[in-house]
Image (cartoon, rainbow, N blue to C red):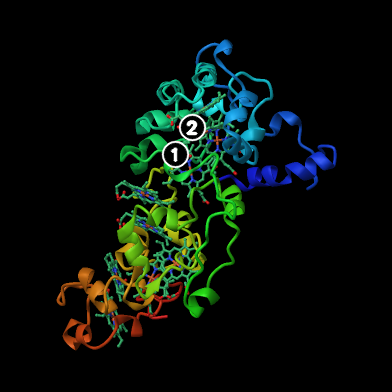
Amino acid sequence: MVSPHNKLVIWSLPIMVALGSTWVWGQKQPAAQKTDSVAWKAPSRGDASQYAGIEICSTCHEDEARQFGKTVHAKAGVEGTTGAGCESCHGPGKAHADAQMEAGSDTAKIDAAKKLIFSFHSKTEENAARCLDCHSTSRDQDLFNRSEHKLNGVACNECHAPHLLFGAEGREVKEPMIAQGKFFSAPRLKEENRWLSESLLRNKQPELCFGCHRTIQAQFALPTHHRVPEGLMKCTDCHNAHGTFQRPLLKKSNWEACVACHTEKRGPFVFEHAPVKVEGCVICHTPHGSVTRNLLTRREDRFSCLECHVDPFAANVPHGRLGFQTRGECVRCHATIHGSNVSEYFIQ
Ligand code: HEC
Ligand code: HEC
Ligand code: HEC
Ligand code: HEC
Ligand code: HEC
Ligand code: HEC
Ligand code: HEC
Ligand code: HEC
Ligand code: HEC
Ligand code: HEC
């Protein structure tokens, strides 16, 4: 994610320019402290004479150039720097441009000329390396090399499209069919605006992720679920697709990923229920979707209690002989099961 600070910087750029580069939200910052999340760095592949420059590329690749021109990448480059523009990703392209000019309509020659430029049809590492050239300095991508995505052959360009092409009317956006689905959905942006405002993603979430994660899609179709399919929440509220230190690609560890929103479960409580913070919320809840109320892992919650509070004669289950195990839910009485400030038995 862009840090809020950087988002602010991106969005307020036009305003800043309009007001003569003063910081409109108050404090003035010395220029040296204005940092992008990504360090601009002109790639140093080959010497300057091997680069053609964006004007040359644009003569033949009008569509890509037009779309590219709308993105932050087009603005990010230091003008006139070797390798800015198209060639910051595609590498030096003079040989390709010259060969294409010579090729005319000779298909064999066109094909040969195509091979003279890097076009992201390579191995995952090579594709990702092009982007990481610059993005290894950004906080959210610096762990990409250890992510399950990278390790399983998913490079940046599977999810991001630096110059997405649309038809004349733009790509069709499917509206949810049923009235209820429509009512509970967040308003949708026109596809191109979405692409530009949502990190150049090829497709919106969760469809982008569902494209590969079919089982997860099935989980979110169950009756109780976080409202991701409705567009009110995103996969990336809990996950970071770029890689983290927490499995499986969770933004924060264990229970912390959940209490970011469910703050009332954060505590600290005078009496903590150990598993909430040790095993984490997912020992009792499924994160995506389930058929049970409250996203519980068991149809009747007492069965999950009894997975741990298992021995009726052990000291920690005093009412084994009262047969509570078979008489309704434990949370009838143990109502503050996530932790309590008054009752060591989580009765209130
Ligand atoms: C599996 C899909 C996926 C892959 C692979 C992926 N990204 Fe992303 N990326 C996303 C999503 C989703 C977002 C939006 C995150 C959000 O809205 O919270 C995003 C956001 C971003 C952003 C903007 C926010 C930020 O983190 O600063 C950048 C920059 C970015 N990605 C760069 C990259 C680079 C570079 C790579 C390859 C090294 C890459 N991404 C690989 C899915 C992916
Ligand atoms: C004289 C016209 C011309 C110029 C100039 C030109 N290209 Fe191309 N380029 C082509 C043609 C033709 C193709 C093949 C398109 C196809 O097969 O659909 C192509 C293909 C490509 C491909 C895809 C290669 C592949 O393997 O599929 C990339 C990437 C590319 N060009 C980038 C660039 C860049 C970057 C520049 C500027 C440095 C550039 N081109 C300049 C005509 C040109
Ligand atoms: C930020 C990196 C980046 C920049 C800058 C960039 N491209 Fe690309 N380009 C890609 C990626 C990634 C792909 C492959 C994925 C795709 O098809 O979108 C690609 C694919 C292409 C293709 C082949 C499309 C196909 O059909 O396979 C062409 C042509 C191309 N780019 C031209 C350009 C031109 C012209 C520019 C400059 C105006 C440019 N690119 C700038 C990343 C970039
Ligand atoms: C030459 C350096 C460079 C290369 C190479 C590069 N980027 Fe970027 N990218 C940047 C800069 C600079 C920004 C702006 C960051 C900022 O303002 O914080 C950026 C921003 C982004 C964003 C955020 C866009 C937004 O609207 O907020 C995404 C997504 C992204 N890059 C993906 C990629 C992908 C994918 C590749 C490889 C195909 C790539 N970048 C290659 C320099 C680069
Ligand atoms: C191009 C296909 C593709 C896309 C798109 C994609 N993924 Fe993945 N993802 C994979 C593959 C392959 C793996 C590794 C195999 C596995 O665990 O399923 C993976 C692994 C993961 C994992 C780790 C699973 C584990 O067991 O460790 C998470 C979490 C994840 N993806 C979330 C996402 C999210 C969120 C998105 C959308 C922003 C997304 N993925 C988009 C292909 C994809
Ligand atoms: C409410 C937070 C949350 C949301 C939203 C979320 N996840 Fe997860 N996801 C988790 C947690 C927590 C786990 C670990 C579950 C475990 O350890 O049992 C997980 C596990 C996974 C896994 C690996 C384990 C498995 O079940 O295969 C994948 C892949 C995954 N999520 C993908 C996604 C995708 C794709 C989306 C969006 C459609 C998404 N997640 C939305 C919290 C979330
Ligand atoms: C020991 C098992 C257990 C653990 C661990 C657990 N929960 Fe729960 N949770 C439950 C049970 C049982 C219910 C149903 C309570 C009821 O019916 O009154 C519930 C209900 C909920 C509810 C809906 C009702 C409410 O109180 O708001 C939310 C939200 C919730 N849990 C979030 C979390 C979060 C977040 C975590 C991790 C910080 C967590 N839970 C950890 C057992 C657990
Ligand atoms: C981005 C914010 C966010 C995060 C992160 C989040 N939740 Fe939620 N959660 C919600 C919202 C909003 C609802 C209410 C959903 C609704 O009514 O559609 C909810 C509902 C729930 C419920 C009650 C479901 C029901 O039956 O109504 C449980 C249980 C729950 N979350 C557990 C978790 C767990 C476990 C995690 C961590 C894996 C988690 N949540 C992470 C926002 C979040
Ligand atoms: C993952 C294992 C686990 C699950 C599931 C679990 N607990 Fe616990 N519970 C513990 C542990 C560990 C303690 C701390 C025991 C201790 O301090 O002696 C504890 C403590 C308690 C206590 C306080 C006991 C005391 O002596 O202070 C109560 C009451 C309790 N649990 C009820 C429940 C109920 C009701 C459920 C089901 C909703 C449940 N537990 C689910 C592991 C679990
Ligand atoms: C009718 C109300 C009620 C129900 C139902 C109930 N409990 Fe309790 N439980 C209590 C009370 C009251 C205490 C405090 C016991 C005491 O004061 O000695 C307690 C104590 C406990 C303790 C702590 C014992 C100790 O001395 O450390 C555990 C663990 C526990 N219950 C687990 C469960 C589990 C698991 C279930 C469901 C199978 C359950 N309870 C159902 C009322 C109930």
Q: Are marks 1 and 2 in contact (CB under 8 Å)?
A: yes
Mark 1, residue position: 156
Residue 253 horizontal/vertical position (percent) = 40, 51
Mark 1 or mark 2: whose residue is earlier in sequence: 2
For the C terminus, the image quarter is bottom left
Residue 114 horizontal/vertical position (percent) = 44, 25
Q: Please tell me which residue lies in front, 301 or 58.
A: 58
Identify which residue is drawn at 19% across, 87% down. Answer: 323
Q: How many marks?
A: 2
Mark 2, residue position: 131
Q: Please tell me which residue lies in front, 50 or 139.
A: 50
- With respect to residue 41, does 50 lie above or below? above
**Quarter of the render that holds ligand 4:** top right
Q: Quadrant of residue 296?
A: bottom left
Label 1 packing within 10 angstroms: few (<14), some (14-19), many (20+):
many
Separation of residues labelled 1 and 2 (CA atoms): 7 Å
Hey, what amino acid is under mark 1? Cys
Identify which residue is drawn at 57% across, 54% down. Answer: 170
Task: Assign a secondary structure to mark 1.
Answer: helix
Camera sees residue 279? no
Q: Please tell me which residue lies in front, 253 or 236.
A: 236
Residue 246 horizontal/vertical position (percent) = 37, 47
Q: Please tell me which residue lies in front, 329 or 340.
A: 329
Disc 1 residue lies near ligand 1 with CB under 8 A = yes
Task: Assign a secondary structure to mark 2.
Answer: helix
Label 2 packing within 10 angstroms: few (<14), some (14-19), many (20+):
some
* Relative horizontal placement of residue 290, taking residue 16 as reference (left or right): left
Identify which residue is drawn at 47% across, 74% down. Answer: 177
